[in-house]
């Protein structure tokens, strides 16, 4: 099976869903405003999904991305307010404070660095301590969520002036969407045309073979999880720009489900070695369109969660059947 043939079915399903929503809710779904909102919303999931694609290709998983996003957002927002002269009372009570340029720059850098540090921690736990990725990131998910609540005692930090990633445009295209596609292109280039990408695929296909080939497996795993963390930090900035605040109690809740679903639906194999950024793009748009259409049709968010969960199970089952078809012994 070719590298891209795994994306054929999800792509066809994506087209069918687009056509279905176009028929059921043409006035709202096909409006330019709604389509741009879909892309804006997909940008947060998509940026994080690019990092998750690398993680899944090395046969890993990161359940902490939602909590990590919350931590990155609050660690970014609070310094923005502090460096802009906000007092403790203003920060704790969500009082509007004008942000200055230096504060925005410092908060932006701190948010991305926090994501990188969190990803690095995940990588160290998995690569050096040999913890199972599922259990390690389940633990750090709780740690990151708790840490985000402790930063501002669970209160949201209001940064209304941090809107440029959502409200800004590049040649009429929302800046968040441009950023997402930029990250996607860079990620695709790294995966397809660099030594790093070849090492990532080799590690996912056979860790023992990669080790015997001279690849520093530990360093590579740590690097992949760090990249994932950095991209979650970027996604946190996009989300914070969209809502104008960092709310540690709700930011990133359920994000891990959408991100993992997008990567798996896009054809990445949870057993490692397979996955493309084109597939991830299809998966991200698939999940975004599905949620948007169901919302327009006033379908309960509970049903939306169930649908995404079933899609993850279907993607896992499809990958398992394909593995058995190729090698029945597995």
Image (cartoon, rainbow, N blue to C red):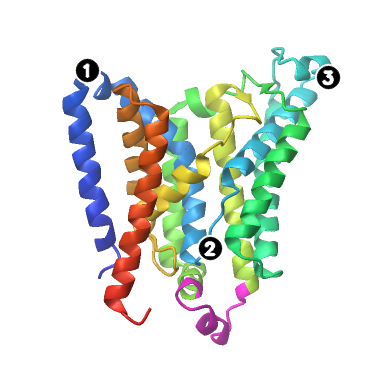
Q: Is residue 24 above or below residue 42?
A: above
Q: Is residue 257 above or below residue 101?
A: below
Q: In the rendered structure, which disc, 3 or 1, sits on the residue that comes first in sequence? A: 1
Q: Secondary structure under badge 2?
A: loop
What residue is disc 3 on? 88
Q: Residues within 10 Å of mark 1 (few under 14, many from 20)?
A: few
Q: Secondary structure under badge 3?
A: helix
Q: Residues within 10 Å of mark 2 (few under 14, many from 20)?
A: many
**Which of the two discs, 2 and 1, sits closer to the camera?**
2
Q: Secondary structure under badge 1?
A: helix
> Residue farthest to the bottom?
212
Which residue is depicted at the point 74% across and 39% down?
147
Residue 172, located in which quarter of the rendered image?
top left
What residue is disc 1 on? 27
Q: Residues within 10 Å of mark 3 (few under 14, many from 20)?
A: few
What residue is disc 2 on? 60
Q: Which residues are magenta?
A: 203-217
Q: In the rendered structure, which disc, 3 or 2, sits on the residue that comes first in sequence? A: 2
Q: How many marks?
A: 3
- Image location (x, y in percent) of residue 67: 62, 41
Tell whether 302 sits left or right of 216: left
């Amino acid at each position: 099976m070719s590298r891209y043939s795994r994306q054929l079915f999800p792509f066809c399903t994506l087209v069918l869903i687009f056509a279905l929503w176009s028929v059921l809710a043409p006035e709202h779904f096909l409006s330019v405003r709604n389509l741009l909102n879909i892309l804006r919303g997909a940008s947060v999931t998509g940026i994080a999904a690019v990092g998750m694609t690398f993680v899944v290709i090395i046969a890993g998983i990161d359940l902490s991305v939602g909590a990590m996003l919350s931590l990155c957002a609050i660690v970014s927002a609070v310094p923005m307010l502090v460096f802009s002269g906000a007092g403790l009372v203003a920060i704790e009570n969500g009082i509007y404070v004008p942000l200055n340029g230096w504060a925005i720059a410092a908060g932006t850098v701190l948010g991305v660095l926090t994501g990188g540090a969190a990803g690095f921690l995940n990588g160290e736990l998995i690569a050096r301590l040999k913890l199972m990725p599922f259990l390690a990131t389940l633990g750090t998910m709780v740690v990151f969520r708790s840490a985000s609540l402790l930063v501002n005692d669970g209160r949201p930090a209001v940064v209304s002036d941090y809107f440029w990633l959502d409200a800004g445009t590049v040649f009429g295209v929302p800046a968040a969407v441009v950023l997402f596609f930029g990250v996607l292109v860079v990620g695709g280039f790294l995966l397809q045309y660099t030594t790093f990408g070849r090492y990532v695929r080799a590690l996912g296909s056979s860790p023992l073979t990669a080790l015997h080939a001279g690849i520093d497996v530990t360093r590579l795993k740590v690097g992949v999880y760090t990249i994932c963390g950095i991209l979650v930090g970027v996604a946190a900035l996009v989300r914070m720009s969209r809502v104008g605040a960092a709310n540690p109690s709700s930011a990133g809740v359920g994000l891990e489900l959408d991100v993992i679903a997008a990567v798996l639906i896009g054809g990445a194999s949870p057993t490692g070695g397979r996955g493309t950024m084109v597939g991830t793009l299809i998966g991200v748009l698939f999940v975004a369109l599905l949620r948007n259409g169901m919302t327009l049709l006033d379908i309960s968010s509970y049903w939306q969660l169930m649908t995404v969960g079933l899609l993850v199970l279907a993607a896992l089952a499809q990958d398992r059947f394909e593995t058995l078809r190729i090698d029945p012994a597995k």
